[in-house]
Amino acid sequence: MNEEKIKNIESIYENAHKRLFFRKQSLCPLSKPDSPKIDYKNIKLLTKYISEGGRILPSRITYVSAKKQKELRLAIKRARSLALLPFVKL
Amino acid sequence: MSLKTSMYEATFILRQDIPSTEVSKMVDVLTSLIKENDGEVLKHEYWGLRTLAYPVKKNKKGHYVMLVLKASHRAFLELQRRVKLSEDIIRNLIIKIEAFDSNDSIMMSADNEK
């Protein structure tokens, strides 16, 4: 009786352990296989990732992965230098 | 002697008050310049007279031209030098690209406005 109880408790712990370490799915909207390519010409895409004032939104708000955020940052800066996007919007 | 070539994407903004015939003339000049330096122009696009996000040298609008070219580094330097000298070109961006897409870029589709 006592041994059984202990076994049960052990199995619960084992399962809990398993559940703790499931794979987290990537939340990044730009890392999916069908997501658009980040390009300075794609203004429609880039405007989604800048604030109302024209600043680049932090990835903790947009959930963009670090790799894609780096590409995004470069693309936005290129678009700004070509006057496709503003540096500051009033 | 063959030089190592790369693909470049060059985008220019031309002054707002020049006619579109001047724009195509400028494209011809740059194209011949690249050809002289043993390069080739793979594609050129005219995005039209667009409103700039902020004024550049007192221009509120600008003619956007993009060239995709395959050229050596020397041709690239020559192009950059020539572009900087021109007073009609108010902004330029020349970047190296990995892959060439012969389809029209997003800019050519009309719905790419803010």
Image: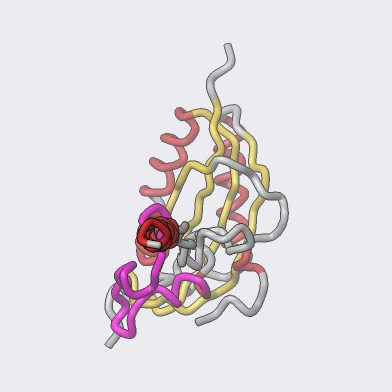
* Residue A44 seen by the camera: yes
Q: Please provide percent x and percent y for residue B105.
A: 64, 61
Residue A59: say if magenta.
Answer: yes
- Of residue A64 and residue B19, the one placed in the foreground of this image is A64
Please say if A72 is above or below B85.
below
From what the image shows, is residue B40 above or below residue B18?
above
| Start-end of magenta stretch | A45-69
Residue A57: name its quadrant.
Answer: bottom left
| Residue A80 drawn at (x, y percent) | 36, 66
Q: Residue at 57% of width from left, 46% of height from top?
A: B29
> Residue B88: in sight, yes or no?
no
Q: Find residue A55 and report its horizontal and vertical position in percent.
A: 29, 74
Which residue is located at x 47 percent, y 57 percent?
A: A23
In the rendered image, the quadrant that contains the C terminus of chain A is: bottom left
Indicate yes or no whether the magenta region holds residue A30. Answer: no
User: Which residue is painted at 58% across and 16% down in the image?
Assistant: B2
Q: Quadrant of the N terminus of chain A?
A: bottom left
Total labels: the figure holds: 0
> In the image, A26: left or right of A58?
right
Whole-percent x and y of residue A38? 50, 59
Q: Nearer the viewer, residue B64 or B97?
A: B97
The residue lying furthest to the top in this view is B1
- Between B14 and B99, the one nearer to me in the picture: B99
Outermost residue, bottom direction?
A90
- Whether B25 is drawn above or below B72: the answer is below
**B55 with respect to B3 (left or right):** left
Which quadrant of the figure has residue A89?
bottom left
Q: Residue at x 67, y 72 (%)?
A: B109
Indicate whether B82 appears above or below B107. Answer: above
Image side of residue A53 versus residue B5, left or right: left
